[in-house]
Amino acid sequence: MTLAIAIESAPLETDIHGVIRVGKTRVTIDTVVVAFLEGASAEEIADQYPSLPLSDIYLVIGYYLKHKTEINSYLTERRLKATLIRQEAEQKFNPEGIRDRLLARRNQSR
């Protein structure tokens, strides 16, 4: 019996916003890679994200291991964008005292 070796590509797709997602799911490559880097096994990641087939998780981890420089650059860029967005939101909507303001608003409506 001869085993035919097929090359599997990582199930990664870039959406219209430039976010890399795993297959047709909403789970991002960031989610899988960060979980892996924090010590989660592929099986633990699959338990947390049941929409991801275990085989896809292994393919994504393998892709990351082969392309660390590029993926780490992508992750750094995403963190920077997230920081900028958070700062812009905090400038528009000051988070200081928000809990007190919300509780006061709730108490006024009673």
Image: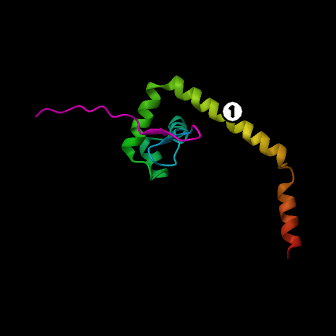
Q: Say above or below: 40 vs 63.
A: below
Seen as rendered, the residue at the extreme bottom is 110
Residue 5 place in picture, x, y as percent: 23, 31
What colour scheme has been applied to the protein in the rendered image?
Answer: rainbow
Q: Residue at x 53, y 29 (%)?
A: 71
- Is residue 40 toward the left or the right of residue 93 in the image? left
Q: Residue at x 43, y 31 (%)?
A: 63
- Is residue 51 toward the left or the right of residue 99 in the image? left
Q: Residue at x 74, y 36 (%)?
A: 84
Give the quarter of the figure containing the C terminus: bottom right
Q: Magenta-highlighted stretch: main secondary structure? A: loop
Q: Residue at x 33, y 34 (%)?
A: 8
For the residue pair 105 and 44, the one nearer the viewer reads as 105
Which of the 4 image quadrants contains residue 41? top left
* Residue under numbered circle 1: 80
- Label 1 secondary element: helix
Residue 68 place in picture, x, y as percent: 50, 25
Give the quarter of the figure containing the N terminus: top left
Which of the 4 image quadrants contains residue 87? top right
Which of the 4 image quadrants contains residue 58? top left
For the residue pair 90 and 31, the one nearer the viewer reads as 90
Residue 48 place in picture, x, y as percent: 49, 51
Seen as rendered, the residue at the extreme front is 16
Where does the magenta region start and end? Answer: 1-18
Seen as rendered, the residue at the extreme left is 1
Going by the numbered disc 1, the residue's amino acid type is Leu
Callout 1: few (<14), some (14-19), or many (20+) C-alpha neighbours within 10 Å? few
Seen as rendered, the residue at the extreme top is 69
Residue 98 colored magenta? no
